Amino acid sequence: MPTERFDFQGAGGLGLSGRLEIPEGTPAAYALFAHCFTCGKDALAATRIARKLAQLGIATLRFDFTGLGGSEGEFANTGFTSNIEDLVAAADQLRRTRMAPALLVGHSLGGAAVLAAAGRIPEVRAVATIGAPFDAAHVLHLFGGHAPALAESGATEVEIGGRTFRIGRSLVEDLSRQDQGGRIEGLRRSLLILHAPGDTTVGIDNASQIFMKARHPKSFVSLDGADHLLSKPRDAEYAATVISAWASRYLGADVETAKASEPVSLGGPKVVVQETGRGKFQNEIRIGRHVLIADEPESVGGLDSGPGPYDFLLAGLGACTAMTIRLYADKKGWPLRRVRVALDHDKVHVQDCADCETREGKVDEITRTIALEGDLDAEQRARILEIADKCPVHRTLHSEIKIRTKSVEPGAQQA
């Protein structure tokens, strides 16, 4: 399953680090995952659940809240409210570049955060919580006897899960003034509550309180034998499987749309490109089991959610160049450590091109710069640059090319 880097700007203007897990083919829906308190997007539960959801057809974004993991900011300056704002910012970015999340999933305090954020993301149809506290202030017990230090200095260091974090008085005050009961009662979204009966970090009574406060449709699933962090792979995968099966009832329209938008059968071609319906230019590119996104910059009406057509052309030439050089150097036994190929494309006037056969208008010009790392002598370097021109894609671009276009009706097989 492809994993894409998905960085974006949080509500506070700071950069947030995310990972988007993409299913094979067109996603049935998009989901947003909120990790547990002080954990991060790369925590075992976050990673396993997001990847399993993607395997089941739901593209899932997991990201680090402000001040954690790869995201900018200081944890001491954040709070529960900032987590909610980060979730809304993540949903906004998905809406701009892909599709707004229809499903929110939250683990532990992240579960409380998705319950609070759901009302601010209109496209959300379903919310699932895992080991979530009923009251956001539940985490205050983790601070133990640090209350006096907070009251005196406004900040102190606490140890949580073997790691030291600096927390501020504002975090405690923020957690204490949240009205989670009111939010849950007014959720008006389908709700799934997953909780382990033996959870010693957030007791099962929290699940009972959430369930009693929420309105229908609501469901509860027991994660019997699991711990709070879902440290066993089978527990995380089971939770994701249950969430996917449950959510399909509420995301049914999205699932049907995804099925209807599967590419026209073209008899098994190597590459299939199809519009996603998101933005003016965004296209899904399927290369075997690999899925890529192509788009155009915002300046020309695109979403800037992926490389443009010429970017992919340059990428193909660059990859072919590097691979050809590597094969040749290894065959010769030369000490080439690494190859780097930088490419750029432009259209230039023919009068600026001394070796062009075309005499009018403009011509395409690709500039390719090759950097060779390793203890190579001048003769070896010169020979490698000659070999670069022999890469198959380079030869294709210089040869006569015939592009034959055929039409095929939906549902028909290519002849």
Image (cartoon, rainbow, N blue to C red):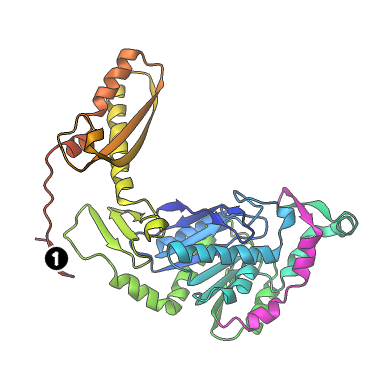
- In which quarter of the view is residue 9 placed? bottom right
Residue 73: x and y in percent read: 67, 51
Q: Using the image, determine if residue 56 lies above or below residue 217.
A: above
Label 1: element kind: loop
What's drawn in magenta, residue-wise?
161-188
**Residue holding disc 1:** 408
- Quadrant of the drawing holding the N terminus: bottom left
Residue 300: x and y in percent read: 37, 58
Residue 138 highlighted magenta (yes or no)? no
Q: Using the image, determine if residue 324 lies above or below residue 51.
A: above
Q: Using the image, determine if residue 42 lies above or below residue 243.
A: above
- In which quarter of the view is residue 148 placed? bottom right
Q: Using the image, determine if residue 354 lies above or below residue 105.
A: above
Give the amino acid at mark 1: Val
Residue 173 highlighted magenta (yes or no)? yes
* Residue ID at (76%, 67%): 174
Residue 331: x and y in percent read: 27, 22
Q: Is residue 16 left or right of residue 398?
A: right
